Image (cartoon, rainbow, N blue to C red):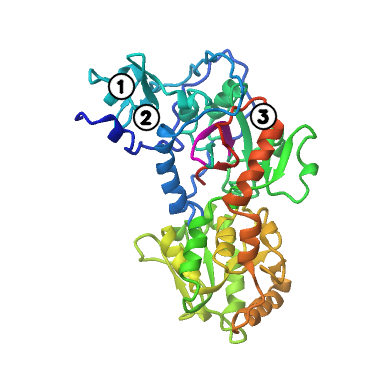
């Protein structure tokens, strides 16, 4: 390491947590009462339609602004600093980001170089390197907890973190629940619909099994995508119709505006996530994206009656040497791609007339809200667990129930989009109800109303945004 001026070190990016899904917790005390947990295997699911460049860049940017922005809280008088305890099961040493390097604690950051090496999560005060006062409103272990996949950070509109953590998936191991139980009195944990049918039991035969009540009863609040939440959640759980896919749509909107006049050369785009091509698209991801139904639908779409053209994303292996089998009638009509980065995916979507969402087991279908933000209508399965709220038939697209009415819905959306005067106005719905500008203030009011006595918001907070996917 070389010495550098303090004002330069403040601008340096910070490494993000990279141990998604990796346990950093030792087994619990064997004498401790065992908790009834579901099986621990949960498959990490790279999502072609979920983790946008916008979100990745946002995460990289937000760790730097929080170092230099003021984080005064909107509480008139703050209580004395609380003495927090760290979970005893952590196996890795605690570490802090000092600017362009890390140390086990702030007092170790300078390494004899003084204030210029005391940045990041630390600040130079009274001739010593101590934890930054800008982070006083969040728990010292906040970033250690959110290194684990199930736990998701929350920030305000100024990229300042708040003492709220979203739980976005079933726990991967007992350590996740141990962490939750250890910190739940010091941090507000809320559930969020983001993974399969979570918090409900997943119908996917390749997923871990647990009782729905296990997670429905666990958190004091939940961001859900259910039509009748009162039929599932206990009365004392605060709920709001909101999901991960409601946020971070600026990149899709900007791309759609830039490519609004691109020639439409495909009827539809289908995003398959990261399918099991070597198993001919049979497995966890293919089940979630309902590819068995897609094959049936393709028989109809590729027939001379409809002669549909489309793009099947993530339908080839990463080497591009093998693709999932599709009906012979689709030869020359369907483009099958490898897993795509966000920009390439948007490129195909901009050249399509509509997006095809046949899935059922999907709590937060990002491609649906992204398509709306690009002014692309949807042909959507009416049975989808999440995302149904994005559909206003005749305005944002069309529903179908199953193969019994698929032809009717297909004909309707083809007739409406193959001409020059489409009646659909999906962008209007996206701009009026979703994206950070709409969903962020709603989430802030939800948290402030129900947990405002437990959360110290940075001064000026008006919006809350879950990070990541």
Q: Which residue is mark 1?
A: 109
Q: Which residue is mark 2?
A: 120
In the rendered image, the vertical position of residue 87 relative to residue 145, given as above or below: above
- Magenta portion: prevailing SS class: strand
x and y percentages locating residue 339 in the rendered image:
42, 60
In the rendered image, the vertical position of residue 180 relative to residue 287, given as above or below: above
**Residue 428 lies in magenta, yes or no?**
no
Dot 3 falls on a residue whose secondary structure is loop
Q: Are marks 1 and 3 in contact (CB under 8 Å)?
A: no
Q: Quadrant of residue 237?
A: top right
Q: CA distance from mark 3 to mark 2?
A: 27 Å
- Toward the viewer: 35 or 168? 168
Find the magenta span and give its range: 158-167
Please say whether residue 132 is visible from this viewpoint. Answer: yes
Dot 2 falls on a residue whose secondary structure is loop
Q: Are marks 3 and 2 in contact (CB under 8 Å)?
A: no
* Residue drawn at point x = 25 percent, y = 31 percent: 5
Q: Residue furthest left?
A: 2
Dot 1 falls on a residue whose secondary structure is loop
Q: CA distance from mark 1 to mark 3?
A: 34 Å
x and y percentages locating residue 448 in the rendered image:
67, 34
- Toward the viewer: 204 or 153? 153
Q: Are marks 2 and 1 in contact (CB under 8 Å)?
A: yes
Q: Which residue is mark 3?
A: 452
- Mark 2 or mark 1: which comes first in sequence? 1
In the image, is 3 to the left or to the right of 20? left
């Amino acid at each position: 390491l070389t010495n550098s001026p303090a004002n330069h070190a403040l601008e340096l990016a910070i490494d993000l947590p990279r141990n998604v899904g990796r346990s950093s917790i030792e087994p619990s005390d064997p004498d401790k009462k065992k908790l009834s947990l579901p099986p621990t295997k949960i498959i990490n699911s790279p999502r072609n339609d979920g983790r946008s460049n916008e979100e990745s860049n946002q995460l990289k940017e937000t760790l730097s602004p929080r170092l230099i922005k003021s984080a005064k809280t909107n509480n008139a008088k703050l209580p004395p600093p609380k003495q927090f305890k760290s979970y005893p099961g952590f196996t890795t040493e605690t570490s802090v980001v000092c600017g362009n390097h890390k140390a086990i604690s702030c007092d170790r950051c300078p390494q004899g170089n003084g204030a210029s090496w005391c940045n990041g999560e630390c600040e130079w005060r009274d001739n010593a390197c101590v934890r930054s006062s800008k982070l006083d409103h969040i728990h010292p272990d906040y970033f250690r907890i959110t290194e684990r996949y199930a736990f998701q950070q929350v920030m305000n509109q100024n990229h300042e973190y708040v003492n709220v953590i979203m739980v976005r998936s079933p726990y991967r191991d007992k350590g996740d629940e141990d962490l939750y139980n250890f910190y739940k009195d010091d941090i507000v944990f809320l559930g969020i619909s983001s993974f399969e049918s979570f918090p409900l039991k997943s119908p996917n035969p390749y997923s871990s099994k647990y009782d729905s009540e296990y997670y429905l009863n666990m958190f004091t609040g939940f961001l859900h995508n259910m039509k009748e939440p009162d039929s599932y959640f206990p009365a004392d759980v605060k709920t709001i119709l909101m999901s991960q896919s409601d946020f971070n749509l600026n990149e899709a909107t900007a791309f759609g505006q830039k490519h609004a006049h691109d020639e439409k050369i495909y009827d539809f785009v289908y995003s398959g996530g990261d399918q099991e091509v070597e198993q001919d698209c049979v497995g966890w991801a293919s089940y979630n994206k309902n590819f068995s139904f897609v094959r049936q639908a393709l028989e109809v779409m590729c027939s001379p009656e409809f002669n549909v053209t489309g793009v099947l994303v993530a339908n080839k292996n990463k080497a591009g040497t093998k693709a999932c089998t599709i009906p012979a009638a689709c030869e020359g009509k369907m483009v099958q791609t490898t897993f795509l980065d966000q920009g390439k995916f948007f490129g195909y979507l901009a050249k399509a007339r509509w997006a095809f969402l046949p899935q059922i087991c999907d709590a937060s279908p990002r491609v649906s809200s992204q398509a709306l933000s690009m002014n692309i209508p949807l042909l959507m399965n009416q049975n989808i667990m999440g995302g149904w709220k994005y559909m206003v038939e005749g305005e944002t697209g069309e529903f179908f129930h199953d193969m019994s009415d698929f032809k009717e819905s297909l004909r309707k959306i083809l007739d409406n989009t193959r001409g020059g005067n489409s009646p659909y106005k999906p962008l209007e719905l996206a701009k009026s109800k979703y994206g950070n500008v709409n969903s962020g203030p709603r989430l802030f009011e939800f948290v402030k109303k129900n947990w405002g006595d437990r959360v110290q918001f940075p001064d000026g907070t008006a919006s809350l945004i879950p990070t990541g996917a």
